[in-house]
Image (cartoon, rainbow, N blue to C red):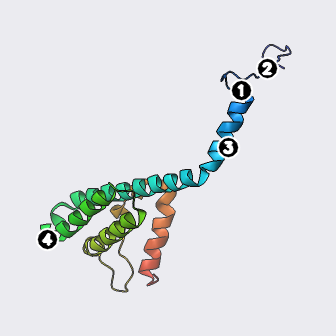
Amino acid sequence: MDKALNKPANITITSSSGLSKEEIEKAKKDAELHAEEDEKRFNLVNKKNQAESLCNSIERALKEAGDKLADDDKKPVNDKISEVREALKSDDVSKIDAAVEAMNKAYEPVVTKLYPAGANGASSFKPEDFEMKNDPRFAEMFKSMSSQQANGAG
C-alpha cells in the first residue's frame, strides 16, 4: 500500500542479471570452493592494513614529539617501521607479525620517555595528553582516572 497516495502498489522482483539458474548455481559452488582461500586473503589484507595503520600512527607520534626526543631515540623506531613496510611487500603473515612485534618493542622506550610512570608506578596520563580530552563522552573517564591517581590507585 502506498501510504502517501493511499493506493495499492504492487512490486515485482525479476532477475535482470541475465544469468541462468545453472550459471547462478555454478557461481555459488565456486564461491563455496574458494571460501577458505578467500578467508585467508581477507585476513592477510586486514593484517596488512592494521600494520600500515600502526606504522602511520607511530610515525605521526614521532613527528609530533618533535624535539622532545633525540634522533637517537627515533632512529631505531624508524628503522623498524621501514622493516614493517618491507615485510608488507610480501604475503608472509608470520614475517609481518614479527616485524610489527619488533617495531612495537623498539617503540616502547619512546613511549616511556614521552609518558613516564608516576611515583606509584601508575601512568601519568592526563586528559591533555589526548586529542579526545575535549570530548564530553570521555570527560567522566578522565575525571575517574585523575581521582584514582590522586588516591594512589592504579
* Circles 3 and 1: CB atoms closer than 8 Å: no
Looking at marks 3 and 2 on the same chain, the residue that comes earlier in the sequence is marked by 2
Q: Which mark is residue 12?
A: 2
Q: Which residue is mark 3?
A: 29
Which quarter of the figure has residue 55?
bottom left
Looking at marks 3 and 4 on the same chain, the residue that comes earlier in the sequence is marked by 3
Image coordinates of residue 9 in percent, x first then y, are: 82, 16
What amino acid type is highlighted by mark number 2? Answer: Thr
Image coordinates of residue 47 in percent, x first then y, are: 44, 58
Which quarter of the figure has residue 72?
bottom left
Relative to 142, 125 lies left or right:
left
Q: Which residue is mark 1?
A: 20
Kindly report the distance in space between the C-alpha atoms of the residues bearing marks 4 and 1.
65 Å
What amino acid type is highlighted by mark number 4? Answer: Asp
Instruction: From the image, state whether disc 4 or disc 1 is nearer to you.
Output: 1
What amino acid type is highlighted by mark number 3? Answer: Lys
Instruction: From the image, state whether disc 2 or disc 4 is nearer to you.
Output: 2
Image coordinates of residue 131 in percent, x first then y, are: 37, 56
